[in-house]
Image (cartoon, grey):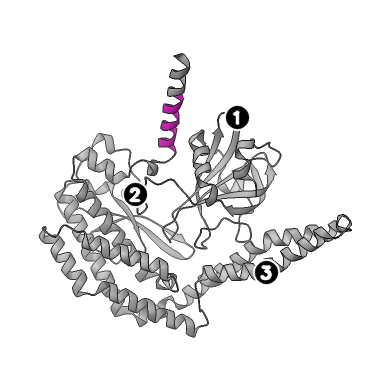
Amino acid sequence: MSEANNKEEDKVERSERRGKKGRRRRETQGQMIQEALGLNPIDIEEVEKKLFIVRFLDFFSEDTLEFIFKGRVMEQNLNRLATYMDSLQIEREEEKLIKQSFESKNIINVIESVKSKTEEFAVSKGIKNNVNKRLRKLTLFITLPLIAVVMLLSFLPAALNLSFVFFPILCMVCLMPQLIRGRVVKNWQQFKEQNKREIYAEHRDDLMILKSFSGELLNNIRARLLELEVPLQLIKFTLFSRDYENLNLVSQRDIRGTMQYFFTFDYPQGMEELPIPEQLSQYQQPLFQEKSSEKPEKNFVVLTEMKGTEGIITSFIPTLKDNVADDINDMLNDSEFSKAQNDFKTIIPDYSESMAIYCVCGELVKIENIQICTWKKKFKFYLFEASECKCGDQIYAISIMDENVEIPKELKKIFSN
């Protein structure tokens, strides 16, 4: 009986640790607000959907080149946008007006037209596919011949005497993809920056249609939240422009030359702020998130071939481990977390484009938080949490803390290359 109780207590403790690690895997903050204020779930869902539409239209308007030659991604976003608009509660007059504006402005057609013309512009400048495809082709073009050479040397009888040739080639196989990725991504960013103004000037009228509809949606959301008596200061969201009214700028940051702005809705003039319920006062991060919080994280990068001691990492090979994401989630659920005392620059002093962690879209990852995880009270490792990428994804990286540490056999398939 005592053993059963101990197992049950361990299960409860693991559940509590999961909650501390990240609320996104249990329920969204929108759901928490809905429960605390006794709101209709449909109302909260509609606010989340409208905020997604605003963020997408704003991002597309400000960084149109980021969406070219991405047919599947665009199709998913446009289908999602159309589905969200169709699902609005048309019995409410405000929603009828929003749907009428959406249809009269031909939002979907405007987006497709701007994307198509921007792709034609890119082709005229020598860009014929998206940066991810170029990265894959260049990586294969460089690494396949090197791998072939390595395999040939490994089968030669005198291979053991050619270590002075073998190991430099092996290092090139490991480092070349990252060097290529860094160079291509840098060139792509420069191309976008050099042509951004021309793209905006060429399609200004169409982009203003998208921005005007985004402004209508923001005003609609603000009015609906006030009607529901939701404290506006709880709701924070990010946009890439400051072209909208009735917003309060909280902060801003520069991401590789692109400004990202953090907003809350501003109260009408003369209206006092609505008080935040005590049980919600702790939630001061963005309220509505685009990704469902009920799904386990999948974007895990493991720093394989790690070199370093005593918590300082001098080199590594970032490897996407989405194929063992379930195992990584289980490992994290069985771990205790404590904030790292050293900052990221101290832990990885040589972090740069040639030795960096990248998002699945090719963007350089910016690490925002570092945790020291202790698995089953016997094995420590790093968990690096990145800020949300412009593409909407978020990357998590894990690494051992010392190259000489013995990795438990249960975790070897996670940390090995």
Could you tell me which residue is drawn at 79 percent across and 57 percent down?
167
Q: CA distance from mark 3 to mark 1?
A: 41 Å
Q: CA distance from mark 2 to mark 1?
A: 35 Å
Q: Position of residue 21 (x, y in %)?
A: 44, 38
* Label 3 Cα crowd, 10 Å radius (few <14 / some 14-19 / many 20+): some
Residue 227 higher or lower than 26, as above or below: below
Q: Position of residue 314 (x, y in %)?
A: 67, 49
Could you tell me which residue is drawn at 61 percent across and 58 percent down?
352
Q: Residue 220 lies in what quarter of the image?
A: bottom left
* Helix, strand or loop for disc 2: loop
Magenta stretch bounds: 10-21
Q: Position of residue 284 (x, y in %)?
A: 33, 44
Q: CB of mark 3 within 8 Å of CB of mark 2?
A: no
Q: Which residue is the extreme one toward the bottom?
A: 124
- Residue designated by label 1: 378
Could you tell me which residue is drawn at 59 percent across and 71 percent down?
137
* Residue type pointed to by label 2: Pro
Instruction: In this rendered view, identify the residue nearer to me: 90 or 399.
Output: 90
* Helix, strand or loop for disc 3: helix
- Residue designated by label 3: 142
Q: Position of residue 128 (x, y in %)?
A: 51, 79
Q: Mark 3 or 1 closer to N-term? A: 3
